[in-house]
Image (cartoon, coloured by chain):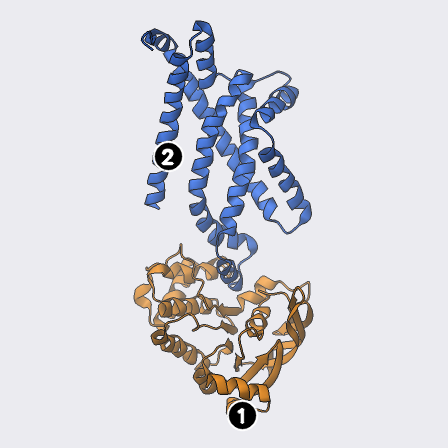
Chain colours: A blue, B orange
Amino acid sequence: MADFRFDIIGEYFPLFMRGTLYTIGISLSGIILGSILGLAIGFGNLSKKWYLRLPMQGYIHFFRGTPLLLQIFIVHYGVVSNILGRTDAVVAAIVALALNAAAYTAEIYRAGIQSIDRGQSEAAKSLGMSHWQMMRYIILPQAIKRMIPAFGNEFIVLIKDSSLVAVIAAPELMYWAKGASSQYARVWEPYLTAALIYLTLTYSLNKLLIYLERKM
Amino acid sequence: MDPIIQVKDLSKSFGSNVVLSDINMEIGRNEVVVVIGPSGSGKSTFLRCLNLLETPQAGDITIEGRSLMDKGTKIEEVRAEVGMVFQQFNLFPHLKVIDNIMLSPMKVKKWTAEAARKKAMELLGKVGLADKANAYPTSLSGGQAQRVAIARALAMEPKIMLFDEPTSALDPEMIGEVLGVMKDLAREGMTMVVVTHEMGFAREVGNRIVFMEQGRILEISPPSELFDQPKHERTKAFLSKVL
């Protein structure tokens, strides 16, 4: 460790910073798109109609039961390249992470909604509210509050898992760490720097979550 | 009698467990019917069938001439005219007291906020809680919470009020304030179906008492008869335990 080469870090610093922005951008897009898709899947999964429920359960099983790396490959080489007619690693990364996050957030929605006491929906119904009004004014406002910590955790997981898209050459943080490592045949400098940046991201997000939870 | 609720051959089971069998009765306009019986006798389930919180397997319920089992009946419209008060109050904890009361008139009946607020304040005054309008439900005592729940149900201007053991979750010193509000309602001519263990209330306020056991109605009589000369051995045995 005596010959720790700070010059490598210095040289790669702008790329690390750009990579970090990509990491944040890809993860944030993934969690936002995933949460929207997950809402539809979660509601479908709660439906009494089997033809809505079964496909959603299949979706959740598939995306929670197969490796994310495999999903990234399928989306990158199969789905996105076929639709766009060319490969686009960043688009593929966002789509893969969003599809994966949707399965997990769907479960967060389901658990959150089911955690609300039956008496709440009974009271809403007894007052003449429709199913939609009950969800909109009674169940979701209470459920979302309980979901926020779980969403935060999913976001933290997604930030870390987004490093996997380095293998399809999406130019995020891990990709540049790998690049620096192979250019100089060095391990510690690039990977410790990347680790420090990941830690900073997840740690500050965790702190923000604790603050939000306490505020509510 | 001018019946507002008609129950015909009502049956309900959870799996193989029969909770209600062949319930038949009519409830008249402005009548107060009190349902008593041992726990597990099906009285709460019976009450919850009247606004379809439980779905019966057989039989029919007609409210104001509309069959609840008819596919063409919009159950939300029926529920808007049938208020319900629960054992556990079920106030909405994320809304202030006043918003608990205003929500349904505004969203279901499309009242203006102004009209709903006026009605809510009037009802809060009536249940003696005008000063709690801006409090959150968690800050209320059980008795206060239940009175707010009654005001919330009344804000929909229901024709019928259902009470499902409204005082069973209350500390003894708070039971009186809730029963007081219910007595006022009865005096104003509200049609009420009350499931309760408060025999004093049943005797004083009830026009007819229904005694249920094992999913069946064993006896329906005016309170003086049911309490003083019960026809059925089971009624006698039950009353000797609770009185």
Chain bearing tag 1 is B
Foreground residue among B25 and A57: A57
**Which residue position holds label 2?**
A206
List x then y, in percent, for residue A126: 52, 64
List x then y, in percent, for residue A160: 46, 27
List x then y, in percent, for residue A56: 63, 41
Q: Which residue is drawn at 38% across and 22% down?
A: A197
Against A42, residue B137 (above or below) is below
Q: Which structural element holds mark 2?
A: helix
Kind of residue at badge 2 = Asn
Which circle marks residue B97 in the picture? none
Q: Which residue is drawn at 55% across and 72% down?
A: B44
The answer to whether B54 appears left or right of A211 in the picture is right
List x then y, in percent, for residue B15: 66, 64
Against B96, residue A55 (above or below) is above
Could you classify mark 2 by the number of other residues whose Cα lies within 10 Å: few (under 14), some (14-19), or many (20 or more)? some
The answer to whether B7 appears left or right of B86 in the picture is right
Q: Is residue B27 visible?
A: yes
Q: Which residue lies furthest to the top in this view?
A: A184
**Which residue position holds label 1?**
B225
* Both marks 1 and 2 on one chain: no
Q: Can residue B207 be seen in this view?
A: no
Q: Residue furthest left?
A: B131
The answer to whether A6 appears left or right of B186 in the picture is left
Q: Which residue is drawn at 46% across and 31% down?
A: A157
Q: Where's the N terminus of chain B, which quadrant? A: bottom right
Kind of residue at badge 1 = Glu
Against A48, residue B47 (above or below) is below
